[in-house]
Image: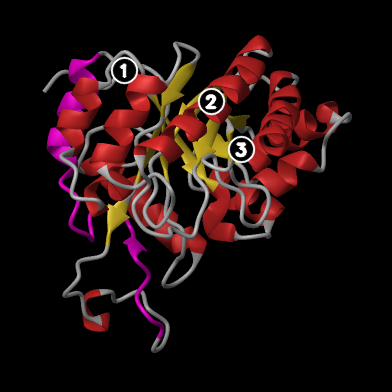
Amino acid sequence: MSEFKGKIAVHAITWGHDYLLGFEEAAKLGYKAIEPWPAFVEEFENRENELIEILEQYGLTMTGVYGGAAGGPGRRFLDPDMRQSIIAYNAKLARILSKTGASHIVFGPGGPRKGPTDRDQLKQAAITINEAAKRTLELGVKACIHPHLWTELQEQDELEYLMELLDKEVYFAPDTAHLSGANMDVPTIIRKYKEKVAYIHLKDLTPKEARVEDFPMLLGNEALPVFCELGLGTVDFKPILEAINEIGYDGWMTVEIDQSTSTPYNSLAICRDFVEKQLGIPVR
């Protein structure tokens, strides 16, 4: 297998709103870069130097932030009435990121999903995405479309039709679990859109037949989350990494687990060890 040319980061979502604890533990685990929670980043509008100082205290770089149709209830790319609100929100995030050295906004679709998204709706979505992406790229920040389970952009046919409508200013942020969960062949998708891939989420899916006994880090009788620590789920990462290496990807690959079954520190240690030992990519 050819060598991974990119860089590993970690997502702060696992720590919820314990933002600084997330920075502290991510750094302690050896991660050098983080994708923070957008609400935290927004707090530093017009005082970005403070955010840079906080990150530097922990030896962390910020990779980007999750935006898109997120940031408000009921917002969807496909809704023309939401267009200006979505564009303004992402332009605001891009202004903050541009002053901190981060260069990616993950364009998360709106949810919850109300059934398949038809072609007319995808045309409306493309207008919003294209305009918002132009605005962010003017600030040096790449907008990366991000298919996501349970949202307006979930299925392969929706992704393929939308990608035909998107301008050159729009990039792609594949997520290994969300693509797998929608029954897409992740290596094929990565190769197909190799010119567009600009950011990656590395994530695993809990097996449908999983039992609590399979997750020894559980503290009690918690329900199993949909996404699990890397290597404990159904995603086959080796062929995905082969595709990533084959296209010469040299950007960020961000380790993500939404919800820990023990503690964020334990979960992200498991993920780090999987990346280092099973994928052969140094984190520390």
Q: Do the residues under discs 2 and 1 have CB atoms within 8 angstroms?
A: no
Specify few, some or many for label 1: CA neighbours under 10 Å numbering under 14, 14-19, or 20 or more.
Answer: many
Rendered-image quadrant of the N terminus? top left
Element type where label 2 sits in the image = helix
242 inside magenta stretch: yes
Residue most extreme to the front: 120
Q: Residue at x 15, y 46 (%)?
A: 236
Q: Earlier in the sequence, mark 1 or mark 3?
A: 3
Indicate which label's residue lies in the foreground, 2 or 1: 2
| Quadrant housing the C terminus | top left
Q: Residue at x 54, y 39 (%)?
A: 77
Task: Indicate the position of residue 2 as horizontal and vertical percent values.
Answer: 15, 18
Q: Are marks 3 and 2 in contact (CB under 8 Å)?
A: yes
| Apparent side of residue 75 relative to residue 161 in the rendered image (left or right) | right
243 shown above or below 119: above
Q: Residue 279: which disc? A: none
Between circles 1 and 3, the one closer to the viewer is 3
In terms of secondary structure, where does tag 3 sit? Answer: helix
From the viewer's perspective, is 146 left or right of 132?
left
Mark 3 vs 2, N-terminal side: 3
Read off the residue under disc 1: 249
Q: CA distance from mark 1 to mark 3?
A: 34 Å
Magenta part of the chain: 222-247
Expressed as whole percent of the image width and height from the top left, the position of residue 112 reads 48, 60
In the rendering, which numbered label is found on residue 127?
Answer: 2
Quadrant assignment, res 184: top left
- Residue 80, label in figure: 3
Disc 1, SS = loop
Neighbourhood count class around disc 3 (C-alpha, 10 Å): few under 14, some 14–19, many 20 upward: some
**Residue drawn at x 52%, y 49% as measured from the top left:** 110
- Does residue 114 belong to the magenta stretch? no
